Amino acid sequence: MRKALVAGNWKMNGTRASTGELCKGIADGMAALGGVDVLVCPPSILISTAATALANSGVMIGGQDLDTNPGGAFTGQTSAEMLLDAGCKDVIVGHSERRQFYGDTDVLVAEKTQVALDAGLIPIVCLGESQAEREGGVTEEIVGRQLNAVLDKVGIAAFSSAVIAYEPVWAIGTGLTASPEQAQDVHAFIRRMLADKDQSVADQCRILYGGSMKPGNAVELISKPDIDGGLIGGAALASEDFLGICSAA
Ligand code: PGA
């Protein structure tokens, strides 16, 4: 049985004050939750604030991205070591906004996944097709290509701990959600790809759905057999909404 994971991706939102309030709201709601892992991924500059505010709450902290270099002259970047030192256990890699706006290619996403694993961080590897790709009927081709790039680099065994997030780009921040059936189809496809390499890893690997998940649609999405939780953007910025999704999971 895979334990559900609900991860909040706060993206480029928050101040120290608002982060403190959001963390307090989440921490206060944790006692009522059971059987679900809860993770928040603040912007790098707010990770320490969140780590302090969430100490002993049971909420895990993750990064939103990492650099492939261990350190040095890379202006603006954050290393795996810095994330670990700030209290992170996980890191998102290959989010569609990174792929779209910052040039993260399949090859770079695979390298970032490897660097995260080598450092002892759990990567949350994001995959997903654009609207045009879905309409063109190439969803599996795109998601398969993105996943294979990572599998070829890190190997199947890594996915006994690494997490996958299926996030259709057309559903991110748009209010459009993949139907539970559409999401389940792609999740099952991803799990079959893993199973082709190793059935027991496929059975263990958590595959999250992301894209306009809210308290109102979380139950029907997460109750699908291959959907093991959510990667939440907008709804992760209000503690009641985020906790609503956690309790659905
Ligand atoms: P959303 O974002 O929940 O606001 O659609 C999800 C994500 O980008 O991870």
Image: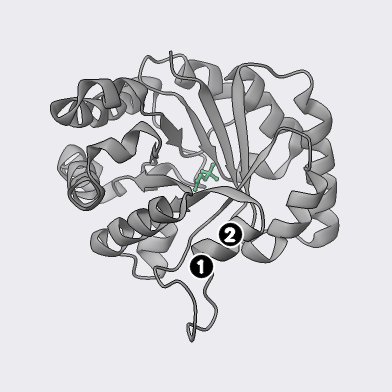
Relative image position of residue 134 (x, y in whole percent): 24, 41
Residue occupying image coordinates x 24% and y 44%: 147
Q: Which mark is residue 83?
A: 2
Q: Which element carries disc 1, helix, strand or loop?
A: loop
Give amino acid for label 2. Answer: Leu
Specify whether 179 is left or right of 34: left
Dot 1 and dot 2 residues touching (CB under 8 Å): yes
Quarter of the image containing the N terminus?
Answer: top left
How many discs appear?
2
Residue designated by label 1: 79
Most foreground residue, 135 or 160: 160
Most foreground residue, 103 or 84: 84
- Mark 2 CB lies closer than 8 A to ligand 1: no
Residue occupying image coordinates x 39% and y 21%: 180
Report whether residue 94 is seen. no
Report whether residue 33 is seen. yes
Residue occupying image coordinates x 40% and y 15%: 224
Give amino acid for label 1. Answer: Ser
Residue 236 quadrant: top right
Q: Residues within 10 Å of mark 2 (few under 14, many from 20)?
A: many
Is residue 97 positioned above or below 120 on the image? below
Relative image position of residue 156 (x, y in whole percent): 23, 38
Relative image position of residue 135 (x, y in whole percent): 22, 42
Q: Residues within 10 Å of mark 1 (few under 14, many from 20)?
A: many
Most foreground residue, 55 or 108: 55
Residue occupying image coordinates x 66% and y 52%: 87
Is residue 25 positioned above or below 201 on the image? below
Relative image position of residue 228 (x, y in whole percent): 45, 24
Quarter of the image containing the C terminus?
Answer: top right
